[in-house]
Image (cartoon, rainbow, N blue to C red):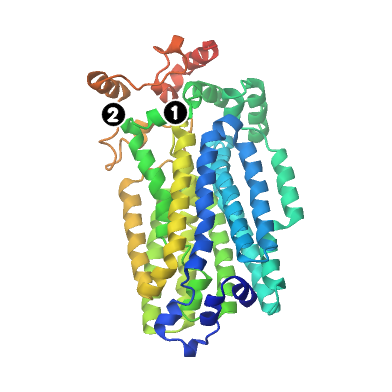
Amino acid sequence: MEPFLKRFFPQVLHRHNQQPGDQDKSNKYCMFNSRWVAFYGISTFVTGLAGCLFAAVVSKRIGYRKLIFSGTVIYAIGACLQTAAPHGTMLQAGRLVQGLGFGFINQAVPPYLAELSPTGRRGMMIGAVQLFAKIGAFLTNLMNYFIIKRAKEGDGGWRMSLSVMSLPIAWALCLASICFLPDTPHRLIHAANDDKGAEHVLRRVRGTYDVREELHAIIGAGPMSEITLIRSMKLLKKKKYIPVLITGMLIPIFTQLTGVNMLGPIMFRAIGFRQEDALGIETINCLLSLMSTIFVMYYVDKAGRRVWLISGGVMMSISLIMLGVIVKAELGKVPSFVMILVFVIGFGASWGPLGVLITTEIYPSEIRSLGLGISVAASFISSGLTSGFYLPLLCFLEYWIFFALAGAVALVTLYVFMCLPETSGISLEQMPMLQVWGSNRCWKIFMVDDDEENDEESATGPSTSVSTTPSNSSQLSEDTSYASSSSLPKHIELTRNKS
């Protein structure tokens, strides 16, 4: 939007106003290549990283509900600062504040939903995060499209676009709804010692009176769920957690390597579309992505995670190769538009909803908080690097960027095929690490029996095993969360006798 560029990025406006016939090929791809534009994009992820790391540290102490509430308030404040910004300093300050709230929300929402969701519906529940995010993106792009078509002059247009993120009524409803959200049964049991409250919440969210089996499973996971941050960090030294940590960091990086955040209005403008057309395409993309996510949410717990990631990766690779060929040969806008739609459908049916789901469910309870913090941090770092280097890369590679992205997606899909185990239908409280990761060709060398690993530790030095209380150290080992259902009453008894 020209008034926005004129006020905050005047050096970009000059290149932006050039007609396609007046631009050489280099300038067409370098139109938005500005360090200030890059910094504006990356600043959200810098404070977002700080926010998610802080949230990971305090999440067990204050709970996910308070983190979600705090993040929502901070995000709304940042949006208001950007809407009212008279100069670049206030605009950037609002962007930084908004990123902090975004970090809180990203760290708290997925594990909150994972702990409330039944095992057989966990994929659908966590996928709902992406679903409603896509609904919001679609509505925002739709409003921006009509705003830009009508508001050509003055500050009204871009301020109206930014105000979509800070509508007082919407945020008031959001905050009010958060106040009525229940605490998770895990937190009620292990932080508040409120078994009755946990049972009430389970009955409420499951819609059934008989929740004893699930309640006992959560209580049985108690010794591991109560491990502190420092003890979780010590646990990460154990070999059996290497696969989930590596995968948890790679998944958000892979999501960025698909190029989804690069295929936006700036890219569409570079390959020949007008500004209004680029925003219209982005709106259609959001709608298609939304429809794909709805479809996948219904089948993700039936078909599993891997089949969607692999099929979506194949679709994205082929569409990116074809898009590169079309742009290089200058075959027109319609074929480019079709390939963009194919890419969006492939992403919406795979990495869009499943990236968050997989990182949420792969961590066992004893390292879940810290592990999710590491995954969200990796997401912010990779997103920030993508935002910072995307414009220079587009300027340098030009249409070759599509072929580079196609190669990256192919490698990501190969990793999924070779090294990502299926986690669908497995309880969060009883994640069988040896069975899930030990049977995979990439990770089986890391998966050893706990007795064998403890023997190795005894031979090399002091044991790093963690117990919840000194009196029960001989009985409550790190293996408690992986106990079979037949030994569950023993764990319940030990948990109840710890005081």
Decide if residue 426 is in sight here.
Answer: no
Q: Find residue 351 and report its horizontal and vertical position in percent.
A: 46, 55
Residue placed most toward the observer, 358 or 57: 57
Q: Is residue 423 above or below residue 200?
A: below
- Tell me how far mark 2 sits from mark 1, CA to CA: 23 Å
Q: Quadrant of the N terminus?
A: bottom right
Question: Judging from the image, what secondary structure is the residue with disc 1 in?
Answer: helix
Q: Is residue 8 above or below residue 412?
A: below
Q: Find residue 429 and report its horizontal and vertical position in percent.
A: 48, 29
Residue 30 relative to residue 134: left or right: left
Q: Residue at x 44, y 76 (%)?
A: 30
Mark number, residue 101 = none
Q: Find residue 343 and report its horizontal and vertical position in percent.
A: 45, 66
Amino acid type of the residue that numbered disc 1 sits on in the rendered structure: Ile
Q: Is residue 368 above or below residue 226?
A: below
Residues packed near mark 1 inside 10 Å, few (<14), some (14 to 19) or many (20 plus):
few
Kindly identify which residue carries mark 2: 448
Residues packed near mark 2 inside 10 Å, few (<14), some (14 to 19) or many (20 plus):
some
Q: Residue at x 43, y 77 (%)?
A: 29
Amino acid type of the residue that numbered disc 2 sits on in the rendered structure: Val
Decide if residue 114 is in sight here.
Answer: yes
Q: Residue at x 30, y 49 (%)?
A: 418
Front tag of 2 and 1 = 1
Residue 376 relative to residue 90: left or right: left
Question: Judging from the image, what secondary structure is the residue with disc 2 in?
Answer: loop
Kindly identify which residue carries mark 1: 230
